[in-house]
Image: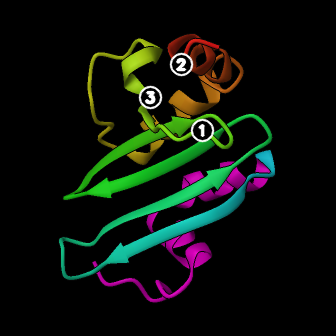
Amino acid sequence: MKLKNYKNCEGILKEMFPKMAKLAIEEGWQITGCRYDQEFFGNAFVDLRSKSLNIRITKDRGQIFIYVSKPGGPRWHNIVNFIGTARGDLSSENEVVRLLERNLLVIPGRLNEIEGQ
């Protein structure tokens, strides 16, 4: 897939992850970074920040992964490792958004448990 507007992070978010873009707007998240690489299978990621959470949504060879970290935290954690879903990847953006929406309030606490704070 060749993106029309992949030179800025907002364009990557809106074109590759439109449902996530809608959730980010609704939740008031800020975009803090991104990358799109057309030469490597169209792989991309977008980093988002809220008051209590950093979120990285990644598309790697067609699979979608979501990672979370504490604000200012050095470590990213795959969301499926501690939310209770059995799969390491989420095959559709709809699954990603549903998983986040259902767990937004518990993720910061789980990160504190994992990182021992």
Q: Which mark is residue 115?
A: 2
The x, y position of residue 43, in whole percent, is 28, 66
Picture quarter with the N terminus: bottom left
Q: Does 103 lie within the magenta span?
A: no
Could you say whether the residue bearing mark 2 is in a helix, strand or loop?
loop
The x, y position of residue 41, in whole percent, is 18, 71
Picture quarter with the C terminus: top right
Please report contact status of discs 3 and 2: CB closer than 8 Å, yes or no: no
Q: Which mark is residue 73?
A: 1
Q: As shown in the figure, which amino acid type bears the numbered disc 2?
A: Glu
Please report contact status of discs 2 and 1: CB closer than 8 Å, yes or no: yes
Could you say whether the residue bearing mark 1 is in a helix, strand or loop?
loop
| Mark positioned earlier in the residue sequence (2 or 1) | 1
In 3D space, how far apart are the residues under numbered discs 2 and 1 (Cα atoms)? Answer: 9 Å
Residue corresponding to mark 3: 79
Please report contact status of discs 1 and 3: CB closer than 8 Å, yes or no: no
In 3D space, how far apart are the residues under numbered discs 3 and 2 (Cα atoms)? Answer: 14 Å
Q: Is residue 8 above or below residue 9?
A: below
Q: Which mark is residue 47?
A: none
Q: Is residue 105 above or below residue 75?
A: above
Q: As shown in the figure, which amino acid type bears the numbered disc 3?
A: Ile
Q: Can you tell which of label 1 and label 3 is closer to the viewer? A: 1
Left or right of 65 on screen, residue 26: right
In 3D space, how far apart are the residues under numbered discs 1 and 3 (Cα atoms)? Answer: 15 Å
The x, y position of residue 98, in whole percent, is 54, 32
Q: Does 25 lie within the magenta span?
A: yes
Identify the residue shown where x is 56% and y is 53%: 19
| Span of residues in magenta | 1-26
Prevailing secondary structure of the magenta residues? helix
